[in-house]
Image (tube, rainbow, N blue to C red):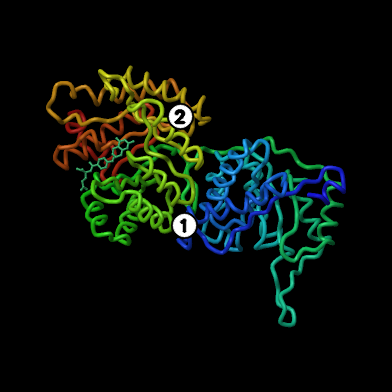
Amino acid sequence: RAACQAAGGQRYVLGSIGPGTRLLTLGQTDWSAMHASYRTQIEGLLDGGVDALLVETCQDPLQIRCAVHAALRALEDRGMGPEQLPIMVSVTVETTGTLLVGSEIAAVAATLRRLPVASLGLNCATGPAEMTPHVEWLAKHWDRPVSVVPNAGLPILVDGRTEYPLQAEPMAQRMSGFVGDLGVSMVGGCCGTTTEHIGALRAMLDMASPASRSQVSFAPSTSSVFGAVEHRQQNSVQIVGERTNASGSRAFKRLLEAEDWDAIVELASEQSADGSHVLDVNVDYAGRDNVRDMREVVSRIAKGVDIPLMIDSTQINTIRAGLESCGGRAIVNSANLEEGEPKFDELCQLAREHGAAIVLGCIDDDPEEAMARTAERKLEVATRMFERATKVHGFQAEDLFFDPLVLPISTGMAQDRRSGLETIEGVRHIAKAFPDAQITCGLSNVSFGLKPAARVVLNSVFLHELQSAGLTSAIMHASKILPRTRIEDLHWEM
Ligand code: THG
């Protein structure tokens, strides 16, 4: 800080926050221990007068979220935010093409996209040549500045010693392409680089004319530890697997009781193999420690299954445990206005702190009709939630998943006979009012209590109608849905 001041000009101190020796996703430490340790480090850096924080050499998306979360808390306590003191992130892509835990660069970007990080880039592990495809991806798809800080090539053994082969001039030349062709904003050198390398980069920058990056495009996505999945699927709804649910599957409930975690991961894997794009995880179960179960189940699924998660619970502490246990970007399921705005706000805030998307169920605090039953009421509640989520909490429409709420039509009660039709019309209204938002539902609810064969037909027809009305996502059992051509006309019409 003092040296920068003495040197004058535009010089900044970046508070470097390295990865440590334990990875959250691999279960080598837990969120609260890592959070506390980051917090201590960040307080020291802030006391020392840094201009920005740089979370670098990141190997695990969950570790990044934990560090960013700790940084935001530390800034908040000093009456500041990331606008005053930027939080920068730099990840380490191994020669395998992913972070150490297996994350593709697209998974990292999806995870950080809705967090207030100022820049994203790469450092360490390889030289500039190996970084090229990932830098190109970031230049095209990341909407903020990109940084590139390579090693001086891949190390080689010379007379029993490791040496970094890339010399200052050729390194600077490689890097000039990143700046001039791809619009990279920050460059530097990691392992094996010397003052000579940094001098050559400085000289290169003095001559460079950075390319503009006006064509950046990013599809709204969730992410597992490994890869990103777009909210909008072509010719399909986003299929959210329903079976990892303690009240939605007897098999899952038994496995949870037996604490057979391996078999639970197996059940989750099967759903991915069956075509689910995302997995709903719900461990709500009276008499068990739901927070502990959520941690156990989510950390294991996140490590072993390659699709993103929807964290489903009526308890905010259980949802928090899920978010703190899964790398990548999840969907919170769900917030509603049943208990008024405080609980809605708390869930929105929690989702925002983790950069997550959120399901908003059409229920409010109306004393006559809390759960919206007509299409008009569904739109009315959705509108109230849309306003609050976007204006108060800063959500983008694309990250809101409205749930019009599907009720069983098979109860035999007169008041339930129209509920399927009202849901379809509700979807149409919501899709028209909020074309950029997502619409999801618990599809199988519609046929509770019917015989299995009838459920398959009813669920399939209902999905077809909802999709035509604008549904973009459904919590469902993928292998129990039939295409129109596999259902007899008579059954379809019934
Ligand atoms: N909206 C939102 N989230 C939800 C729901 C919703 N989460 C839970 C639920 N509803 C959606 N999930 C399921 C999961 C399973 C079933 C229905 C909805 C189901 N299961 C069979 C049964 O109970 O008969 C299977 C039984 C078994 O395999 O043992 O029908 O509406 N946002």
Determine which of the numbered discs, if any, sits on residue 423 in the image.
none
Type of the residue with mark 2? Ala
**306 to the left or right of 161:** left
Label 1 SS: loop
Q: In the image, is residue 99 above or below residue 432?
A: below
- Is 77 in front, or is 344? 77
**230 to the left or right of 382:** right
- What residue is shown with label 2? 437
**227 to the left or right of 444:** right
* Some atom of ligand 1 lies within 8 Å of the CB belonging to the residue at label 2: no
Measured from the top left, where is residue 183 in percent x and y?
Answer: 73, 43
User: Can residue 19 be spotted in the picture?
Assistant: yes
Measured from the top left, where is residue 266 in percent x and y?
Answer: 32, 58
Measured from the top left, where is residue 244 in percent x and y?
Answer: 30, 49
Cα distance between the residues tagged 1 and 2: 34 Å
| Residue depicted at x 69% and y 45% | 52
- Within the displayed image, which quadrant is ligand 1 positioned in? top left
| Residue depicted at x 67% and y 60% | 124
Type of the residue with mark 1? Asp
Measured from the top left, where is residue 364 in percent x and y?
Answer: 33, 24
- What residue is shown with label 1? 30
Question: The C terminus is located in which quarter?
Answer: top left
Label 1 crowd bin: few (<14), some (14–19), many (20+), radius 10 Å? some
| Residue depicted at x 65% and y 46% | 88
Q: In the image, is residue 474 above or below residue 326?
A: above
Label 2 SS: loop
**189 to the left or right of 99:** right
On the image, which quarter does residue 437 sit in? Answer: top left
- Is 221 in front, or is 369? 369
